[in-house]
Image (cartoon, rainbow, N blue to C red):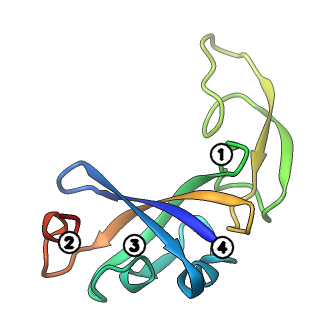
Amino acid sequence: MEFKVIISDPKTGKAYQRTVTGANANRLIGKQVGDLISGTIVDLPPDYELQITGGTDKDGFPIRPDLLGSAKRKILLSGGVGYKPKDRGVRKRKTLRGKVISREISQINMKIVKHGRVPLEEIFK
């Protein structure tokens, strides 16, 4: 089990990548978009707090925060995550993944909610 985790820092606007495997990856299964997690899951100091903001599955389908469960579904969209229409009023049926993290997810996006004492530039050298 392996997840690619993208950690975004809203203060600096930078993003950092970390691979999570083993027991820490298993701790992420069952979490949902919007959940707060400790920084220790992604090998950050424990005073960091992260929020799950989205991700993609192994086939590239995005996670949509308003879809329940973890299954893939084809839904009719007029905008938002997974579809950006060029013209007003256009709707399209797209395949998206639910908001619960499962084994099919390959990338998880997170943002820092609570910063620690050590800056991220020093951690990701």
> Which quarter of the picture shows residue 114?
bottom left
Dot 2, how many residues are within 10 Å of its Cα: few (below 14), some (14-19), or many (20+)?
A: few
The image's mark for residue 62 is 1
Residue ID for mark 4: 1
Q: Amino acid at mark 4?
A: Met
State left or right for residue 100 relative to residue 3.
right
Dot 4, how many residues are within 10 Å of its Cα: few (below 14), some (14-19), or many (20+)?
A: few
Residue drawn at (60%, 25%), measured in percent from left and top? 84
Residue drawn at (83%, 39%), measured in percent from left and top? 75
Q: Amino acid at mark 3?
A: Leu
Residue ID for mark 2: 123
Q: Secondary structure at mark 4?
A: loop
Q: As rendered, which of 3 and 115 lies closer to the eye? A: 3
Looking at the picture, how far across and down is residue 67, in whole percent? 75, 55
State left or right for residue 122 relative to residue 81.
left
Looking at the picture, how far across and down is residue 36, in whole percent? 47, 77
Task: Estimate the spatial distance between the alpha carbons at disc 4 and disc 2, rounded to whole Å.
Answer: 24 Å
Q: As rendered, which of 21 and 39 lies closer to the eye? A: 21
Q: Tell me whether the residue at label 4 lies in contact with that at label 1, contact meaning CB atoms closer than 8 angstroms.
A: no
